[in-house]
Amino acid sequence: MPGPRKGLCALLAVALLAAPVLSGCGQDEPTAAYALAHSGVLGGMLDSLKREDDEAELKELAERAPQSPEERQEAREQAEQAEVEVSPSPSPEPEGEG
């Protein structure tokens, strides 16, 4: 009988630990993971990582941005062409005889 008891105890322990975490997932209340992530040491580390990621993204966008007027015009034309291709063309309405 010790084997099934150990399994049952382990299952109950996991359920007791998982229930509070899973119950807060759909609510607006902060969870333990949220509190841990926004605590002193981890919060500062996460903020610095986010800031570095944002800076890298801005740098990448600046590198990809068109520099000359010709490049800007070409980018504008490509955006317009993509918009035309995505939007469905209006179908002509049949004219009724009468």
Image (spheres, rainbow, N blue to C red):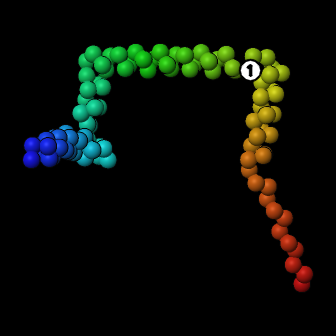
User: Does residue 16 appear in this view?
Assistant: no
Can you say which quadrant of the picture contains the C terminus?
A: bottom right
Most foreground residue, 74 or 36? 36
* 51, above or below 81, in the image: above
User: Does residue 72 appear in this view?
Assistant: yes
For numbered disc 1, what is the local secondary structure?
A: loop
* 60, above or below 85, in the image: above
Location of residue 95 by image quarter: bottom right
Q: Amino acid at mark 1?
A: Pro
Q: Residue at x 67, y 16 (%)?
A: 63
Looking at the picture, how far across and down is residue 57, in whole percent? 56, 20
Q: Is residue 44 left or right of residue 13?
A: right
Looking at the picture, how far across and down is residue 92, in whole percent? 84, 64
Q: Residues within 10 Å of mark 1 (few under 14, many from 20)?
A: some
Looking at the picture, how far across and down is residue 67, in whole percent? 75, 16
Most foreground residue, 78 or 6? 6
The residue most toward the bottom is: 98
Location of residue 73 by image quarter: top right
* 40, above or below 87, in the image: above
Q: Is residue 81 left or right of residue 64?
A: right
Q: Residue at x 26, y 26 (%)?
A: 36
Total label count? 1
Q: Is residue 52 left or right of residue 22?
A: right
Most foreground residue, 68 or 82? 82
Looking at the picture, how far across and down is residue 8, in whole percent? 15, 46
Most foreground residue, 21 or 85? 21
> What residue would you read off at disc 1?
66
The residue most toward the right is: 97
Q: Is residue 69 left or right of residue 10?
A: right
Q: Residue at x 80, y 40 (%)?
A: 81
